[in-house]
Every structure is written in C-alpha cells, then in structure tokens.
Image: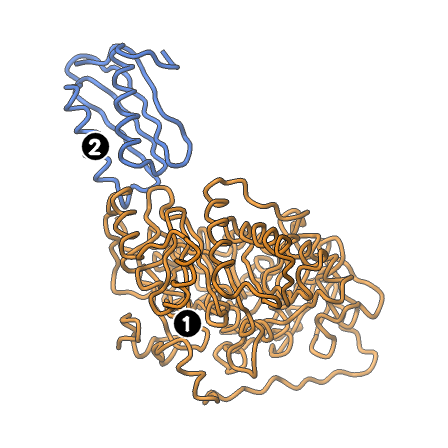
Amino acid sequence: MKPKIPAQSGTFESSDVIVLIEPLPNRSGRKIEISSTVMQQYGESFRHIVDGMLDQYEMTDIHLIAKDKGALEPTIKARLETAIKRSLGQQEGTLT
Amino acid sequence: MLNSLGREIPEYIEGIGKLEPFQGALTKLSKGWMDEPTIPAPNKAYLPHQSKLCRTLEEAIIRSNPHNGMTVSFHHHLRNGDILLVQTLTILHNMGIREITLASSSLNECHDPILPYLVDGTVTRIFSSGIRSELGQAISKGVLDTPVVIHSHGGRVRCIHTGKIQIDLAVIPASAADCEGNATGSHGKSAFGSIGYAVIDARYAKQVIVVTDNLVNFPCIPLSISQNFIDHVVLVDSIGDASKIATGTTRITNSPMDLRIAKLAADVIEHSGFFVPGFAFQVGAGGASLAVAKFIREKMKTKGLKGSFMLGGITSYCVDMLNEGLFETIFDVQSFDAVVSNSLLNNRHHIEIPAALYANPFNCGCITNKIDVVVLGALEIDVDFNVNVITGSEGKIRGASGGHSDTASGAKLTVVVCPSFRGRIPIIKKRVHTIVTPGETVHVLVTERGTCVNPAFPELEANLRKAGLNIKDIHDLEIEVDKITGIPAPLEYTDKIVGVVEYRDGTIIDVIHQLKEK
C-alpha cells in the first residue's frame, strides 16, 4: 500500500517516539530515517521493528522519519501502527 | 592482575605508576595502620606587612612560579557557575606552559572550554572525582595519553597527603576574603557555602592563590581558609555565574517515579532496624535521593523521633530539618543552595568541615564512619550490588565518584535508589560497566519495581520481609527489567585505558577502556 497523506504520531517526550510519514512518488520504495537516544544499544532492533511493521502493511513509496527518546518496544509498535493507519486514511489523526 | 571483584587491572601505567588492586572495602584499613608515608607540606616565608594583593589573576599566577609539568588544583564548590578554572588554564596556556596535571576536586559542564588544552598538550593528566559533558566524552574517546584518575572526595585528601597528587598551584575562589587570604564561601554575592574541599589544597600546595569578588576588611570571618597558608590574594569582578553557583532552595522532585522510589526507600529505612533515636543520616541532592528526606522527615515527626546529625552535600531541606529540631547538627562539606550559606554562617550547629574530616580513610576517623543511613543514587547497579556512578549507558565518562564509596563504606545502612530502567536502558545489570562502589558496602537497592537486599545481610532482609515490603531477588528483578526493555547491544571497547578508578583507600577498583568509534 501507499500512504495517501502525510501523517504523524507520538511525541518528543522521553520514553516516547515521534513518527512522521509522507507519501513518495511511485516506485520510490522506502526511505527510512531513524534517530534515537539509544541508537547504540537498540538501533538494530528499532530498524527491525520498523521493517516488520512496514512489511505487515505492505507499505511502499513511503518516507518515514522516527525520532526516538528511548521508547519501549510496545510504544514503538503502537506509534508506527497509528502513523501508518493515519497515512492510509484508516484512522483520524491530530495532524491530517 | 585481577582485583577481588574480578576486574583486570594493569600492574603499571605510564604517567600514573604502580597500581595496587582492590582487595576489599576494609582490607587495607583493617590492618590498623597505613604503610604510605605522609609527604611534608611546604614551609613558607613571609615578611611582616608584606602585601599579598595582586591586581590580576595573571599577576598572581606569574608570581606563583608557573612551569611545565606543574600540578594545578581547584575546588568545585561553585559547581556549574565556576569561571576561574578555565581562566587560569587559559592564562597558563597563553604563557606557553605545557604538560599540566589538572587536579580539580571535580569537573562540570562549565569546564568544557578547556577541551582544546587537552588536545594541544597544555593539560596532559587529570585527577578528579567527576568528569562530565564534552570533556568526559573526549576523554572516553582517548584524547589524553595518560588515563585520568577518578578518586572519591575522601580519596582525594589521601592522594594529597601521600603525594600522589603534589600541588604546585592551588587557585581557590572564595565569596569573601581579606588582604591576607583568610577566606570563606559563606557570605558575599557569590556565596556558595562550605569550602570544605579546598582546605587540603590550601594546606599542601606550594603556591596558593585566593581569588575573590568580595574583598572585606581584615579579618574575614569565619576563617574557613586561613591566611597562614595563602601566598597571594586577587580581587576580581566575579568569581562565577551566581545563578549557577547557588540559588534559592532545592525543591523536592515532582516526578511520580522518583517520589514512588523515595517513598519505598523511606519504608525500607523505617523498618531496617536503623531508624532509631540518635540516628545519623545522609542523602544526596538529586531527585529520588533528596525526596527520601521528605518522607523520613514525615516519619520522624509522626514517631517523635530525633536524629543525631546530617552529613554531606547539604540542601535547604536538611537545614529545615535542623531548624525543626529533627537533627541536632549538620556537618557540611558542600552546600547546594543559597539558604544553606546563611545557616552555615549563623547557626553554630551547622558546622563547616574539610574533606579530610568528611571522608579521608587514612586518619583516626572521618565522619562518614559515623553514618547510620545513607541514600545514594546510581547510574548502574549489578546483581552483586556493585554501583557505577561514573560511566553512562553508552560507556562514556559522565558522572562523579564524589562521596559515594566513602559514605557507602561508612554507613550501617546504604540504600541505593534508582529507577529500574531509564529511557529504555536497564539500570540493573549482570555486570556494571565501571565499578565505583563495591557491592559489599551496599545493603539495599530500591526501585519502583521492588526492593532487593544484598544477601550478605540476611537480618536486614528478615526485618524488611516482616514489615511486608515487596522484596525481590536482584537476579529476578534484573531478568524482569530485561524483558521490558529488551537486551541492549553490548558496547565495544579498545585495549586502551582512558580512566583509572581508585577506591577510597587508593587501590584500583576498576579501569575505563576507550570506546570503539563507530
């Protein structure tokens, strides 16, 4: 699936992550940017979670930015799911 | 060679010398005497009515025989408001002095501007109880060839007595001083309270400069630092940023997490068997640690229980408890806010003490030995109760040994308070990155998820269980937290040693390796 609209979820608070999604032109693939206060310790696992979620929703032509301040795995997954669903228009967001 | 905690310690390090491995918290002291001799403090000559006043810091430094390879010392009572350390090193740098050993009682963020002097060889060795910010990062990455030496507050005094640190020049900022160098931090626009860490520097340095922004009529009272040790006196516009030195009162944290941990810790103290009339108490100034004082204060009032003394870094909260009659005395080696200075100046039960009396292990009894209950923080703690307060989760130097190991070794009950994880990083580890305080001196760990008692103290555990507290095995808690956070990828280091951590008795409890650049 392709994102229809730009979408956002999460916050800049400690122990949270903010996820931003925007649609890209056809056949652009996935462009993913992750920054995290715990990149050194959990960078790989974070990337793995993002890939897994995008695969689950079969997302493509997507630009995803995640800025993490030490969110736990369930938080990361919830924020990603919300941002994806908002970008697909399946869920109303606060920034649409 | 391995020390008794299983840490690999080299036998010799160029620029530091032979290292003695840590063998137990009281092993060296239990002999009853120390083999290390005391080096003599310098004799000095001074004529009647000769003037010590210099017009500028630079003039005072020029008169202090600056030379390559010299050791320069400072105190950190101005905390993050200090400007004189950077000014002094800049003057020495501009004079072309090289290979300086910097021996500050601690280093803060405000000292980051000296980083270029580490790069260019102006400063080549550092002794300190703490290093943070950019300096800590650069040192962790190996900017110095000689490892820094991290000592405790008590250990620093021992280092100076035994000649491990031989100070050529001590620069002592004071918020009030007279023309002879009698000086104090307890009044003046830049008041910072106790000047306890600098007393040993004044006694032992070959040259001592007192710098003040408040030159008062002779004599400056109280004689926290006395003139018979002072070579030069400088009046400057400002000794530091007053807003960062000491402001108002210290507030108790609002953080629900810290408050919960503090409340649990207070319950532990109440039921430990050490919460008895005449008990001696020390808390840190940080989040959960200080908040424990709030709950202990309430419990003391409810029970009508009165303690003996409070010790350490003193906050306005301690002063309130003194004024309410909950404690009889405060021993103050370091003051954290402006209210404390007033109390130190005006209340004779609020006593300024030098670091030697506070915590030096090599004497007939420092006051840390008299503590009943101390509450301390931690960056990490492991399943053997060893505590790290010097390196962060990313392996970089970013903390301070301070009085952590001194007070832990002296107290009958050492309570470590910390969240079980911070920003996804588990705080309870199988093995801490760097040991500062050995587990044998830590009795209890209190986290928001439960309390763990060191198995070496079964009677304490029995007391706490009887009171119905939530006691967990530390191994179980460690696994529980790992399940929540996930297991962090291990850090990678090189063989190069960038820091040596002294235990308070001078033995080496751990070393810090250079981080591998990614």
Local SS, label 1: strand
Q: Residue furthest front?
A: B466
Q: Residue at x 26, y 48 (%)?
A: B518
Q: Chain of mark 1?
A: B
Q: Which mark is residue B502?
A: 1
Chain A, colour shown? blue
Amino acid type, mark 1:
Glu
Q: Is residue B29 left or right of residue B329?
A: left
- Which chain does the numbered disc 2 sit on? A
- Residue A93 sits above or below residue B431 on the image: above
Depth order, front residue of B302/A42: B302
Residue B128 image position (x, y, % from top left): 49, 66
Image x and y of residue B361, in percent: 51, 78
Q: Which residue is mark 2?
A: A49
Q: Nearer the viewer, residue B138 or B91?
A: B138
Reply above or below: B416 against B167: above
Picture colour for chain B: orange
Q: CA distance from mark 2 to mark 1?
A: 42 Å
* Residue at image point 72% right, 59% down: B175
Tell me the kind of residue under disc 2: Ile
Judge whether residue A48 can be spotted in this image. Answer: yes
Residue density around tag 2, few if under 14, some if 14–19, many if 20 or more, within 10 Å = some
